[in-house]
Image: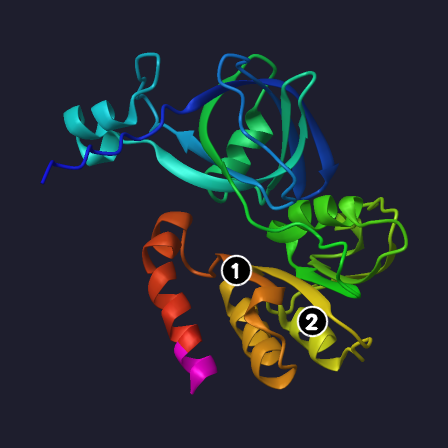
C-alpha cells in the first residue's frame, strides 16, 4: 500500500492595511488590501472567518511566509500566534477585506494591534472558514451574540431576504456600543446593555423568555462559551430545535486567551453534547 502524501499547510495570505475606523468605543474596523495573487475564497457564508497571524515582538519571518519551516526551524516561543476573526465584508473588485475588532485597551493581542494599525502595515492570515448563512427557506431566524459575534450577526442581517422575519439580540457594554444594522428583512433588533453584569446573562434571559413565532426557525448563537452553552442546552432540550437548524459556537471563554480556549474547545463541545443527550 502506497504511503499517503502528507498534507502541506497552505501558504498564508498577505494583506496590507488600507484604512481604519473607530466604529464605537470598543470596536475598530480595519480594511485590508489582499495580495491579488492569493485571493481568499470567500463565498456566501456570513460567518466566514480568517486566522490572523501575529509574530512575537522582535521576530521577523522571511517571505513568503512558510509555517511548516517556522515550526521546523524555530523554537515554539517564536511561532506566530493566531487570532480568529469574522470577515465583516469582502469586496472582490477591490480585493479589500474588512475585519472588525473588539478593543479593550491594552488587553489581548489583536485589539491593540488594530488600535495601532496604520495604512501600509502588513499582516498574514489563513482561511477563510465558515458554515452559516441565512436560509431563505426558514420561516424565521433567531440570532444572538455578544460583541465578538456582532460582525457575523451584522453580515447575516444584511443578507436576510426581503421580508424575512428575524429576532436579533446583541449584547454590548452600553448604548455607546450600538451600531446601525442594515437589512431588507423584517428584523426586530434588540440591543442589550450589559453594564456591570456578567457577559451573556441578558442574552440568556432574552432568548429563554422569547415567545417563539410559529414555523421552522434557523438559529445563530455565538459568543462567550458560558452563555452559549446555556442557550445551546435551552434550544436543544427545551425548544426541541433540530441540530441541523442550529449554528452555535463559543468564540471565546472568560479567563482564557484564544490559545487556551482552542486547546480545550473540543472537550467543551463533547461535554455539552453529553449533557444534551443525558
Decide if residue 169 is on the left or right side of residue 113: right
For the C terminus, which image quadrant? bottom left
- Count of picture labels: 2
Depth check, front residue: 225 or 97? 97
Q: Is residue 194 inside the magenta stretch?
A: no
Which secondary structure dominates the residues rendered in magenta? helix
Give x and y (percent) for residue 218.
69, 64
Give x and y (percent) for residue 275.
43, 82
Question: Is 71 situated above or below 101?
Answer: above
Q: Is residue 277 inside the magenta stretch?
A: yes
Q: Residue furthest left?
A: 1
- Label 2 crowd (10 A; few <14 / some 14-19 / many >=20): many
Residue 199 in sight in this render: no
For the N terminus, which image quadrant? top left
- Label 1 crowd (10 A; few <14 / some 14-19 / many >=20): some
Check disc 1 and report the residue beneath it.
249
Which quadrant would residue 36 be assigned to in this image? top right
Give x and y (percent) for residue 103.
59, 42
The Cα–Cα distance between marks 1 and 2, rounded to whole angstroms, is 18 Å
Range of residues picked out in magenta: 274-278
**Which of the numbered marks, if any, corresponds to residue 202?**
2
Name the residue located 85 percent from the left edge and 44 percent from the top edge: 182
Which quadrant would residue 209 be assigned to in this image? bottom right
Amino acid at each position: 500500500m502506497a504511503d499517503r502524501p502528507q498534507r502541506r499547510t497552505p501558504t498564508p495570505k498577505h494583506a496590507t492595511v488600507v484604512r481604519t475606523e473607530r466604529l464605537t468605543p470598543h470596536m475598530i474596523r480595519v480594511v485590508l488590501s489582499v495580495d491579488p495573487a492569493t485571493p481568499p475564497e470567500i463565498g456566501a457564508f456570513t460567518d466566514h472567518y480568517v486566522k490572523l497571524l501575529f509574530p512575537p515582538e522582535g521576530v521577523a519571518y522571511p517571505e513568503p511566509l512558510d509555517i511548516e519551516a517556522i515550526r521546523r526551524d524555530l523554537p515554539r516561543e517564536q511561532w506566530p500566534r493566531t487570532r480568529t476573526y469574522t470577515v465583516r465584508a469582502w469586496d472582490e473588485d477591490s480585493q479589500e477585506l474588512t475585519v472588525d475588532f473588539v478593543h479593550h485597551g491594552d488587553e489581548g493581542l489583536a485589539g491593540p494591534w488594530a488600535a495601532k494599525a496604520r495604512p501600509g502595515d502588513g499582516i498574514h492570515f489563513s482561511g477563510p472558514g465558515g458554515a452559516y448563512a441565512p436560509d431563505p427557506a426558514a420561516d424565521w431566524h433567531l440570532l444572538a451574540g455578544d460583541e465578538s459575534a456582532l460582525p457575523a450577526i451584522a453580515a447575516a442581517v444584511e443578507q436576510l431576504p426581503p421580508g424575512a422575519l428575524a429576532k436579533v439580540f446583541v449584547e454590548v457594554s452600553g448604548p455607546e456600543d450600538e451600531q446601525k444594522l442594515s437589512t431588507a428583512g423584517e428584523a426586530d433588533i434588540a440591543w442589550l446593555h450589559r453594564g456591570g453584569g456578567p457577559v451573556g446573562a441578558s442574552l440568556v434571559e432574552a432568548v429563554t423568555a422569547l415567545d417563539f413565532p410559529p414555523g421552522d426557525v434557523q438559529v445563530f448563537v455565538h459568543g462567550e462559551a458560558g452563555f452559549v452553552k446555556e442557550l445551546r442546552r435551552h434550544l436543544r432540550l427545551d425548544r426541541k430545535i433540530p441540530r441541523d437548524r442550529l449554528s452555535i459556537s463559543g468564540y471565546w471563554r472568560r479567563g482564557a486567551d484564544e490559545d487556551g480556549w482552542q486547546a480545550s474547545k473540543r472537550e467543551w463541545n463533547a461535554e455539552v453534547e453529553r449533557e444534551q443527550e443525558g
